[in-house]
Amino acid sequence: MLFTNATIITMNPTRDIIGDGALAIQDNRIVAIDKTSVVRARYPDEEVIDVRGKLIIPGLIDTHVHVAQALIRGCADDMALIQWLCERVWVLQGNFTHDDGYVSARLCIAEMLRSGTTTFLESMLAHRYGFDGIARAVEESGIRGCLAGIVMDIGTYATQANAMHPGMIESRETSLLGVLDMHSKWQDAANDRIHVWFGPRTPGGVTSELYREMSDLAHERNMGITMHLAEVEADKSYLNEKYGLTPVDYAESVGLLGPRTVLVHMVWLTPPEIDKLAATGTHVSHNPSSNSKLASGVCKVPLMLERGVNVALGCDGGPSNNDYDMIREMKLAAIIHKAVTNDPLIVPAETVLEMATINGARAMGLEHEIGSLEVGKKADLVVIDLERLHTTPSINPVSTPRAFPPRRGMPCVCRVACHALGPPRSPPPLYCLPTSRPLCLHHIAPV
Ligand SMILES: [Zn+2]
């Protein structure tokens, strides 16, 4: 299958942008990427999908998702985090059944695919959501998902004793050992689209002994770990009062730092903690919408990038963001740090696209497979229609995706091709009609 006549933002190591470009895909991998004339001459007999006037980017990678929260979108607006969790989110989720988990995952995945996300990292699946059903929703949809199962053994949140709804409390046996069972059952399933990770609760919900046991198991089995940390100031003061440690030093003390770990939010950090993240290769998932809605603060992303931390992007959940749309998340990530620093040059569009693609792939240990459009990688790609009022004119193709979408119900991603989907070479869903209007090529570098 060939996609021809597009502007292709490759996100390859030299960040090439190809005007009038084409991609050739065989089975589920990219076998050629070049000018349309070159690719067509090399593959004269392949089926052609003409995407003239459209933009192709790598599939977006959302590194912080709660799929079981799509069903409770908007249940708790204008509330502080701890009240939001204890009085609304956990109360509702503490009554979830496996059917609720499956339906919510399908809703969440449909929204992610519709807005250009082809890979996600689920943060914390509780036993009661039904891991099997959620893995099945991933399998059926064609999306790629790393599913972290919850690990916990205490029902508190930081200093809030008995904070959790009883329906949300799990033991070491149910949580840690349950994740190991799911790892044995689902790791590399669905044509390698499903991976199983550990998703421990924040400090206060897990004993130090259990964190260490989990970290050792992750090391032995080469499993990923993702955890919320330093989201609000209370997280920081809790660890200081209980252990006399900063959040990052505590994480290090229980074996959590390293290149297999994605820490989420990371708002309340000091510069030495940021240096420690960089030195250990620990990844950060930046969630600006969630942090803004819950008034958690603004993550020091410019400093993290300057000190060499790999920063990826995430939408979080239905109640904390109210959508699972990485294009909206990219826009906020690109402008919020400018507002905070009074520096219009900080966190440019190119950097945000890196966060949403190749940095996300690196955080999930999948940079050899996805995150950029290169020969040999999986053909996870998004075709964006530039024939919309809000994208006309498209002067800078890297900046344009941030304009999407203007409102609900107006599809802008015309194709999401997650090519592990369905039988090999079956066409992905088509949402928009092709157009013939040429794109402004002002900023496109020749390849
Ligand atoms: Zn979260």
Image (cartoon, helix red, strand yellow):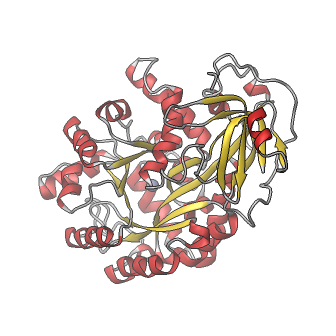
| Residue 153 as seen in the image, left or right of residue 403 | left
State the residue in front, 193 or 141.
193
Residue 122 position (above or below residue 360): below
- Residue 186 at x, y percent in the picture: 52, 76
State the residue in front, 277 or 221.
221
State the residue in front, 196 or 298.
196
| Residue 416 as seen in the image, left or right of residue 433 | left
Q: Quadrant of ligand 1?
A: bottom left
Report the number of discs: 0
Q: Is residue 74 visible?
A: no
- Residue 367 at x, y percent in the picture: 48, 50
Residue at screen point 56% across, 67% down: 192
State the residue in front, 429 or 289.
429
Which residue occupies the extreme left position in the image? Answer: 244
Residue at screen point 61% across, 46% down: 325
Q: Is residue 203 visible?
A: yes
Image quadrant holding the C terminus, namely top right
Residue at screen point 85% across, 50% down: 45
- Residue 429 at x, y percent in the picture: 79, 54
Which residue occupies the extreme front position in the image? Answer: 42
Residue at screen point 33% across, 46% down: 232
Residue 70 position (above or below residue 13): below
- Residue 361 at x, y percent in the picture: 48, 50
